[in-house]
Image (cartoon, grey):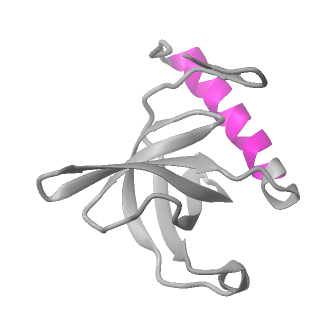
Amino acid sequence: MVTDEHRRAARTDVSLIARVRPLRSTNDLARRSRSLGIAVTDVSLLGLSFLTDQPFDIDDLLEVDLSWRGVELSVHVVVRHVLVLSSLRTVGIQFVITQSTKHAIATLKEWLSTIADAKPVVD
């Protein structure tokens, strides 16, 4: 369970299809770069973690496409931690809440509610 002054969230293990694209500047938000497949390990309304063999640095800005049950959404995120485990890296990202991502976060909230009803929540 994550709690601070303004937000409270619980994480749960999921199996989402996801892709991630590095963004080098705000100009990159308007054009697509090559997507990398990632393995999402957990997700909350604050952000998510994923496994990859690609390098990422703290404070990198990324665009993440998530897909579940035929619905796709795209969110902008910032890398908050990177843990190197031999050939794989665990990357923790935080959602950047903007007008353009609020709808995606609302959809993600519905997904998490459905997942939480089907699985026990992991604290």
Part of the protein shown in magenta: 103-118
> Which residue is most to the left?
86
Q: In the shown orientation, is residue 4 left or right of residue 40?
A: right
Q: Position of residue 20 (x, y in %)?
A: 49, 66
The image quarter containing residue 115 is top right
Residue found 61% across the figure and 57% down from its top? 77
Q: In the shown orientation, is residue 35 left or right of residue 32?
A: left
Total number of numbered discs in the rendering: 0
Q: Nearer the viewer, residue 71 or 9?
A: 9
Asked if residue 36 is positioned above or below residue 100 in the image, the reply reads: below
Magenta highlight on residue 67: no
Asked if residue 85 is positioned above or below residue 43 in the image, the reply reads: below
Residue found 82% across the figure and 55% down from its top? 98
Q: Nearer the viewer, residue 112 or 57?
A: 57
> Which residue is most to the right?
99
Q: In the shown orientation, is residue 116 left or right of residue 34?
A: right
Q: Position of residue 42 (x, y in %)?
A: 44, 35
Predominant SS of the magenta segment: helix
Residue found 71% across the figure and 79% down from its top? 26
Q: Nearer the viewer, residue 96 or 37?
A: 96
Asked if residue 33 is positioned above or below residue 46 in the image, the reply reads: below
Looking at the figure, which quarter contains the N terminus?
top right
Q: Nearer the viewer, residue 115 or 56?
A: 56
Asked if residue 50 is positioned above or below residue 3 in the image, the reply reads: below
Q: Position of residue 38 (x, y in %)?
A: 38, 58
Q: Position of residue 3 (x, y in %)?
A: 64, 18
Residue found 52% across the figure and 25% down from its top? 11
